[in-house]
Image (cartoon, rainbow, N blue to C red):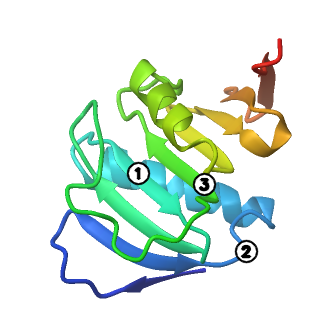
């Protein structure tokens, strides 16, 4: 599914190529699960972000327990951003004020944003009228969907 490429930008920045991640729900769930695992098990509870660019390239970085950015410019990133995914390893999946600032800054160049938390995630979909959906996985593995609304409301 994902091919990681060599880079000379240091340990905090990785580049890869992903294909068909959003076309297959099983692949998408596994992909998001691996991002969550890297943030909570591989790294010591650090935020991780993955940006999928217009060429299906992954731009990956890690930050602190409460903040993530690119310490170096994401070389070769092509707009539009198909999806910006980041984690909140401390538990809750919600878009913080900083996250909303990022979305609002990039919204004309970004199709989708996702935040991953413990057994839940939030999705902002710019192509669906800037709709925000919160999804929680229950103990019996059912999904609870809650559409929060759109800017028009």
Residue visible at 54% across and 36% down in the picture: 103
State the residue in front, 14 or 55: 55
Q: Earlier in the sequence, mark 1 or mark 3?
A: 1
Q: Quadrant of the N terminus?
A: bottom right
- Label 3 sits on residue: 83
Q: CA distance from mark 1 to mark 3?
A: 10 Å
- Label 1 sits on residue: 49
Callout 1: SS: strand
Callout 2: SS: loop
Q: Quadrant of the C terminus?
A: top right
Front label number (2 vs 3): 3
Q: Is residue 78 above or below residue 94?
A: below
Q: Residues within 10 Å of mark 3 (few under 14, many from 20)?
A: many
Q: Earlier in the sequence, mark 2 or mark 3?
A: 2
Q: Is residue 152 above or below residue 73?
A: above
Which quadrant of the figure has residue 20? bottom right
- Label 2 sits on residue: 20
Q: Earlier in the sequence, mark 1 or mark 2?
A: 2
Residue visible at 80% across and 66% down in the picture: 24
Residue 75, how many percent across, how many down? Answer: 34, 73
Q: Residues within 10 Å of mark 2 (few under 14, many from 20)?
A: few
Which quadrant of the figure has residue 151? top right
Q: CA distance from mark 1 to mark 2?
A: 19 Å
Q: Residues within 10 Å of mark 1 (few under 14, many from 20)?
A: many
């Amino acid at each position: 599914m994902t091919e990681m490429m060599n880079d000379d930008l240091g340990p905090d920045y990785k580049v890869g190529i992903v294909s068909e991640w959003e076309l297959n729900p099983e692949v998408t769930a596994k992909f998001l699960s691996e991002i969550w695992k890297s943030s909570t098990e591989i790294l010591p509870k650090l935020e991780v972000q993955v940006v999928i660019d217009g060429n299906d390239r992954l731009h990956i970085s890690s930050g602190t327990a409460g903040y993530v950015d690119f310490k170096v410019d994401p070389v070769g990133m092509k707009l539009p951003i198909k999806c910006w995914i980041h984690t909140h390893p401390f538990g809750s999946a919600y878009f913080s004020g900083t996250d909303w600032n990022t979305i609002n800054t990039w919204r004309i160049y970004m199709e989708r944003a996702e935040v991953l938390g413990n057994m839940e995630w939030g999705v902002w979909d710019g192509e669906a009228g800037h709709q925000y959906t919160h999804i929680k996985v229950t103990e019996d593995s059912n999904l609870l969907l809650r559409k929060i609304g759109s800017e028009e409301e």
